[in-house]
Amino acid sequence: MIAPDGLPWGRLRQPDQLSCGAATLVVARMLADEVYAERVLPRFADEVLTTHREVVGWWPRALGTPPWALVRHLPGHHRLVTRPSFDRVLSAAPRGPVAVYVGNRLLPRHVVLVVAAAPEAWVVYDPARGGLVTVDREQHAEDRLPFGRWHRAWWALVPR
């Protein structure tokens, strides 16, 4: 269950600038498995870095976590959706976490995790902040997502 004011474990920041995808994966696993969450919480940063190495494999670490790697490792079954609509993500969130790749108009650069749906808003874990933020329909439609320099949703990994 997601607390209205944050994650149930407090703030969980990604340990470096390249591990946003791995941080979203670790948080998705923590939400799905309480035993895992209790085990990794005290060493969240180490778990994220280990997960990043394991998940990306041959892919250059400097390019972050590719969507095909993340889709294979998220709990449950997910599919890649390009230029995801606000409603597609909103309707998928009750079935499980939705990883969203965000970026500028040229390319995706950051991964966030929609962990819940509020009335007409996504509740999003942003690993750069370590906490939750909401995204409304207008922000999405106008490519004004609140993730630093990354304002546009490129891909979503939605639960089936």
Image (tube, helix red, strand yellow):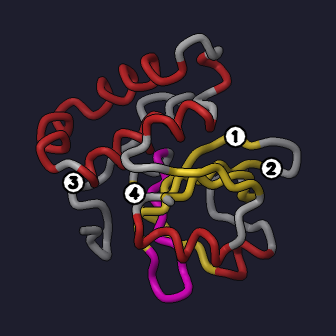
Residue 111: quadrant of the picture: top right
- Tell me the residue at 13%/35% (across/down): 39
Q: Position of residue 130 (x, y in %)?
A: 40, 50
Residue range of the region highlighted in magenta in the rendering: 117-127
- Tell me the residue at 66%/74% (across/down): 86
Mark 1 and mark 2 in contact (Cβ < 8 Å)? yes
Mark 4 element type: strand
Q: Position of residue 31 (x, y in %)?
A: 28, 54
Q: Earlier in the sequence, mark 2 or mark 1?
A: 2
Q: Earlier in the sequence, mark 1 or mark 4?
A: 1
**Crowd band around label 2 with a 10 angstrom C-alpha radius: few (<14), some (14–19), many (20+):** some
Q: Position of residue 30 (x, y in %)?
A: 26, 47
* Amino acid tagged 1: Arg
Q: Does 49 sit above or below residue 14?
A: above
Residue 131: quadrant of the picture: bottom left
Mark 1 element type: strand
**Crowd band around label 3 with a 10 angstrom C-alpha radius: few (<14), some (14–19), many (20+):** some
Mark 3 element type: loop
Q: Position of residue 121 (x, y in %)?
A: 54, 80
Q: Earlier in the sequence, mark 4 or mark 2?
A: 2
Label 3 belongs to which residue?
9
Q: Does 47 sit above or below residue 84?
A: above
* Amino acid tagged 3: Trp
Mark 2 element type: loop
Label 2 belongs to which residue?
104
**Crowd band around label 1 with a 10 angstrom C-alpha radius: few (<14), some (14–19), many (20+):** some
Label 1 belongs to which residue?
109
* Amino acid tagged 4: Gly
Between the residue at mark 1 and the residue at mark 3, the CA separation in whole angstroms equals 26 Å
Q: Earlier in the sequence, mark 1 or mark 3?
A: 3
